[in-house]
Amino acid sequence: MNQRSSNLLDEALGLDQAIEPWPLRGRVVAIEDRVETSGSFVLHHLLKRSLSPNSSNVSIFIAFSQPFSHYDRVLRKLGCNLVSQRDNGRFFFFDMLKLQCPVGDEGITPGGGLIALYGKIHKTISALPEISQKNVSIIIDDLSLMEVAANGSSDYVLDFLHYCRTLTSEFDCSLITLNHEDIYSIEDGSTFLLQMAYLADILIKAEPLATGLAADVHGQLTVSNKGRNKASNFHFKVKENVVECFYPGRSRD
Amino acid sequence: MAKSIFIALREGALEGELAPALTIKDSVASPFGFQVFDHVLCQLFSSILAGKSPSRGLIVVSFSRSPSFYLELLKSKGISVASSDKRIQILDCYNDPLGWKDQLVESGNFRAPSHEALISSVVTVFREVKHMDKLFNSIIELGRGLVGGGKIRFSIAIDSVDEMLRRASVSSVARLLSNLRSHDQISSIFWLLHSDLHKARVTAVLEYLSSMVASLEPSHQLANGQRGDLENFSLIEHNSKKGKFHVRFKKRNGRVRMMSEEVHIEQSGINFTPLSSEGAINQGLVPKVQFNLQLSEKERIDKANVVLPFEHQGNGKPLQIYDGRRSLVDSKHVDAVENVETNEDGGRGEIIYYRDSDDEMPDSDEDPDDDLDI
């Protein structure tokens, strides 16, 4: 039941066949949501899949939006214990809630800011045993708050993401990011979102239905998978401890 | 047509002429720029290897993809890099563009990865992408190292200009590109540009600098600003497999030529086909219904052959226009004439009309409204 209900999302991401080797390795996944439809459930789902007991994946979670206890509670509902995963060395949590990049000269000092964060991630991955080095997911929640921490310099965030991307080619790890689509004004040309769209191999959009709010459907997901030249679209409903995905008109209740 | 691009890039510059330059331009709606770039790169490099080009080497300036990606790509096309490392050099602006790794190594927080040494004979790391002058010098130096000095030429591939534009001003990027074009050792140059990341004027500047512009456009335009509903989604799906490929050539004499093709993206690679007619595209998009919304090819031809009653027939014969007031005798006569004509030039169509029922009034000079009591 639990397995079946998430099938569409897994299928779209290629997670339905084998989880080992991690199907997202070497890929950049960008999740874009809106204020009416939070996309964080996709992030939780990916985290849960990457920590699944029959794989040797390691997740590095860079949190700008919530403290550890929040994710711990959410993942526990999904049937995954973050504390024990952390103790097993499969889950690394970087609490960046209070990160403030030094002002002036874009914070280019090895001591602080995003450069130091990159150094920390790199160090964590290098310290892993050879076998897990190949299956690392770097998860960032979320990019808009990272931009805030970087004093609003989206270029600095893009540079950081570029360096994270070099990790995907160096170690074959995957990079998963969450961002909000509706906070960028059209006047800016929403360049940041476009940059992310070019950067990402898989783009997941969580949007409300075009027809407005509905009780039985919370929104729709559009997954564009560049590597496989495939796009899929389906509706979802977020429940207490599971997310149901179904094709339009196929809700099971 | 894609072929004429390769020929132009392969033939390179004549003595005392700017090197031919190609801009490959795409947008998020049709993001196949990288595939086209790869395709051009492989074609050009294999003709350099085969000695078919005056250019003796290729410099790849890689900003957005790792050098190892390009080595893998060439290998997958059956080009062995080990034996051809005298012909290709990669300037690596991908792995450490801002020197962060260097800084971290200095502060002792970082261990340099070990496997980089393996490919170092082909790859040179560049760490100061903000300085276009230094970038220019590095490219030229690398090229000279590859082909030697004198008059021997080499080609340059840049993926992508966007990263340069993000870190340096438009004018300095334009200066770099135009300096490269006018350098007398450079045979041809091409670069990739994501046009929607920049203002229109930036794209125009780069287009002026190039002798060829290959732009990729979606085969179906999405309505802007619309939320993704299902109808839009089918277009997105459609656009994720193919697009339109327009090429603009600027000739030496100033003539500009536009050509269009269709580009298909497949798992195995990229395919160029002549543009299919609009009709064929539309047919694929019309939803499947029980009745016919469209004409078959034969029906279309038949329809085109029908001479409409009001159409001027202009063949010297008296005009026979049915005005609804002709007597029975007259119309019989007309029928006879029509029949003869039809037999004469067989392919001509005619309108055959069956009255649906007796309820329907025949056309006559009866006033259909005469029962109205006004």
Image: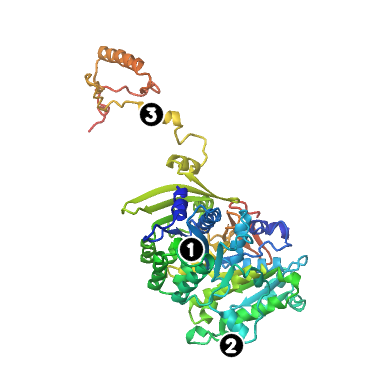
Whether residue A212 is visible to the viewer of this picture, yes or no, is no
Q: Measuring from the top left, give residue A15's x and y in whole percent.
A: 68, 59
What residue lies at 31% left-to-right and 27% top-to-bottom? B308
| Callout 3 touching callout 2 (CB < 8 Å) | no
Along the line of sight, which residue is nearer the eye, B184 or B127?
Answer: B184
**Would you name the residue on which mark 3 appears?**
B303
Q: Measuring from the top left, give residue A161's x and y in whole percent.
A: 56, 73
> Callout 2, which amino acid?
Gly
> Callout 3, which amino acid?
Lys
Question: Mark 3 or mark 1: which comes first in sequence?
Answer: 1
| Element at label 1 | strand
Describe residue B214's horizontal placement relative to residue B315 as left or right.
right
Count neighbours of disc 1 (C-alpha within 10 A) and say few if under 14, some if 14 to 19, many if 20 or more: many
What residue lies at 76% left-to-right and 79% top-to-bottom? A87
Q: Chain of mark 3?
A: B
**Would you name the residue on which mark 2 appears?**
A111
Q: Is residue A19 above or below residue B359?
A: below
Residue B156 circle label: 1
Q: Is residue B25 above or below residue B124?
A: above
Whether residue A7 is visible to the viewer of this picture, yes or no, is yes
Marks 3 and 1, how far apart in space? 55 Å
Q: How is the image coloured?
A: rainbow
